Image (cartoon, grey):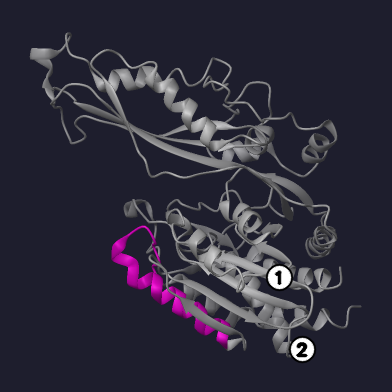
Amino acid sequence: MNTRLDPVLARIDADIDPTLERLMTFLRIPSISTDPAHKADCKTAAEWLVADLQSLGAEAELCDTPGHPMVWGKIGSGAPHLLFYGHYDVQPVDPLSLWDHDPFAPFIEERESGKVIRGRGASDDKGQLMTFVEACRAWIAEHGTLPCTITFFFEGEEESGSPSLIPFMETHKDKLAADLALICDTSMVSPGVPSIASQLRGMLKDEFTLIGPSMDLHSGHYGGPALNPLREISRIISTFHDDQGRVTVKDFYDGVEEVPAEQLAQWESCGFDEAEYLATAGMTVAHGEAGYSALEQQWARPTLEINGLWGGYQGPGSKTVIPAEAHCKITCRLVGTQDPDKIRKNLRAHVEAQLPVDAKVVWDQDLEGSPAAVMNTARPEFEAARQALSDEWNREAVFAGMGGSIPIAGFFTTILGLDSMLVGYADDDDRIHSPNEKYGLKNFHKGIRSWARILDAVSKA
């Protein structure tokens, strides 16, 4: 029996209804950071969080930036000092016609697999952010204080490139000083398998326009002699990969290491179901780099993806035009010590070397890149948290790679000198960034209990 922790867990269970109502109130705020029409809504969400932290007894304030405001709060005393990060902004909801309900009218839905919370932001990241806040609320309700010092740091631009984040962190290093950063914005490797991220892929974004004729051309008058930018851009991007799925850009794999056999064996026993993972997306086989499992492709191999390709007439019916321009959006997920700046340079050289006569390329000059991150799982807090998760979920928790990119983890290291621990309770089928986003009610409830256990364990580590 844990006389310090057990009353906190009991409080979490007893208070689940008002806890859910607080989350529902938060989810009703349409805090879409990319859309200027929702600027006031983003401020409303930030103000709501400040008031909620103050209701815990925390010192809390809204911090203005050139973009959407940051939320900062602090409560507790004694070691360790933990910095918890989350984001209150959400993705746009388009296409709205694919939603089965109002994205900002959240509700509990009964499903065969269990109850889920439906609404934009339910999983990414409002629901996950609130698991930690509610764990703190339960500790304070039972003991009047927390077992350690907590600084809260909530961002409002994560879904729109975080343009204010680095300047804010560099200016406010003292306010964000701590012993360890905690982040709750990730998924479990498989339903019911609690996971702590051991590594994250980096990210490189780029975009280019291929320009051909000086104007759109009539395909009867110029079809044949004219350079067609759509045809040429399709030819160029087809050279990005060979028939084994490997990227052909020069030196792309510099810094990419094979997964050690011991680590690969751990991954293979972590509960990941490849068939289920693929079936969730309507696939039967992995289509990435040949010779690697879906898990390796997702966690340990780099990618070059075409995210958007367009040009010419997009309306109904036909328009017999040869377009003057074609456009392409690209992202690369990076691993190991791949250098995003070097890859960007070589990617652009790859495209430019294949331009036909009479064509030119214009590159977007305002896109970011960040390297991969590896977590310091040797710290005693990581094993303490892993055991706490195992106790809550009645299943061995795992250190797992993550296919996504969360640049804040790297910024915590480079700007604040902090290691980061990433623990998330989302499932791969939560439809984050898609219509009909959900978050399992069980995951939300057990996520709160898990953080309560982690606070207990880490404060003793």
Which residue position holds label 2? 143
At mark 2, the secondary structure is helix
Tell me the quarter of the image containing the C terminus: bottom right
- For disc 1, the neighbor class at 10 Å (few under 14, some 14 to 19, many from 20) is many
In the picture, residue 9 is in which quadrant? bottom right
Give me the residue at 58% from left, 23% from top.
Answer: 251
In contact (CB < 8 Å): disc 2 and disc 1:
no
Numbered disc 1: secondary structure: strand
Amino acid type at circle 1 is Leu
Q: Which residues are magenta?
A: 30-54
Q: Give the x, y percent position of residue 108.
A: 52, 68
Q: Is residue 326 left or right of residue 335?
A: left
Most foreground residue, 356 or 199:
356
Q: Which of pointers 2 and 1 lies earlier in the amino acid sequence?
A: 1
Relative height, residue 98 to residue 389 (above, below): above
Residue 109 seen from this side: no
Label 2 neighbour load within 10 Å: few <14, some 14-19, many 20+: few
Quote the CA–CA distance across marks 2 and 1: 18 Å
Whether residue 129 is visible to the viewer of this picture, yes or no, is yes
Q: Residue at x 30, y 62 (%)?
A: 36
Q: Residue at x 57, y 70 (%)?
A: 153
Tell me, yes or no, whether the highlighted magenta stretch contains residue 192: no
Q: Amino acid at mark 2?
A: His
Which of the numbered marks, if any, corresponds to residue 251?
none
- Picture quadrant where residue 148 is located: bottom right
Q: Comparing marks 2 and 1, which lies closer to the viewer?
A: 1
Circle on res. 82: 1
Q: Is residue 31 magenta?
A: yes
Q: Residue 321, percent across and down?
A: 14, 23
Position of residue 383 in the picture relative to residue 208 (left or right): right
- Looking at the picture, does residue 201 appear above or below residue 229? below
